[in-house]
Amino acid sequence: EAGVVQSPRYKIIEKKQPVAFWCNPISGHNTLYWYLQNLGQGPELLIRYENEEAVDDSQLPKDRFSAERLKGVDSTLKIQPAELGDSAVYLCASSFGKTGTDTQYFGPGTRLTVL
Amino acid sequence: KNQVEQSPQSLIILEGKNCTLQCNYTVSPFSNLRWYKQDTGRGPVSLTIMTFSENTKSNGRYTATLDADTKQSSLHITASQLSDSASYICVVSANTGFQKLVFGTGTRLLVSP
């Protein structure tokens, strides 16, 4: 069974340009997460979906970040316009449920470099 | 404030040696604690999960302990291998009705031949 798939794996853009990341979770997983991970730090939650509903987006900088999970399966995270400080790894994770014992499975991440 | 602190920040050991990584947390209300392994350029992978009533959990050469009274956990790696070189992240789940994870900053382990 395939794990969480993310693309692209790497992205280099100039500041003020838009960028989008795509995530396909493990089949059957209802909960999907987007995290931001800076170098040497643990992941920080940006947004959590339960099916197609964004149930926790309190940490998402909504002035430039947006996300969608239209059919409750794959998801897209967008940044427009990108800033230098957005350079980081963007991780997508999924879990079957939302309870504390549901394991989150992470994708390999997209490493974004903003020049 | 919910926090997870890990030590040491980085560690270098010789292949075949044992090591222990530490995690202290102040997350409340506590649900469970996980140790994740994150290889360079990859996403974190869950190694162990422990709930409040569990004191120890093993996964091959990895053994995690939990002291819920002192809010401390450790991850012991036995007979280290080169493939153990990675970051090890302690993650505590808060019982808020849904899974809210609080991540530590990780311990970067390098196993040297």
Image (cartoon, grey):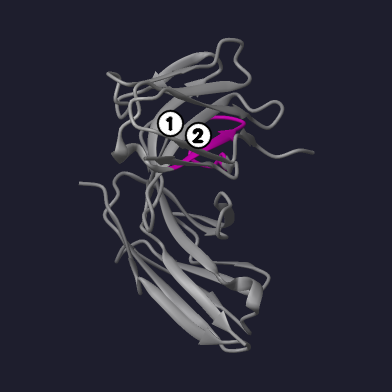
Query: Does the segment drawn in magenta span residue A91?
Result: yes
Residue that badge 1 annotates: B98
User: Chain ID for label 2?
Assistant: A
Residue that badge 2 annotates: A99
The residue under label 2 is which amino acid type? Thr
Is B11 displayed left or right of B76 in the figure? left
**Distance (Cα) linking label 1 and label 2:** 5 Å
Query: Does the segment drawn in magenta span residue A44?
Result: no
Is B103 displayed left or right of A106 in the figure? left
Q: Which mark is residue B13?
A: none
Q: Is residue A57 above or below residue A103?
A: above
Image point 46% across, 78% down: which residue? B20
Label 2 Cα neighbours within 10 Å, binned few <14 / some 14-19 / many ≥20:
some
- On the image, the x and y values in percent for residue B70 come to 29, 66
- On the image, the x and y values in percent for residue A51 come to 56, 17
- On the image, the x and y values in percent for residue B113 come to 62, 88
Judged from this view, the residue extending furthest toward the right is A1
Q: Which residues are magenta?
A: A89-104
- On the image, the x and y values in percent for residue B5 come to 30, 62
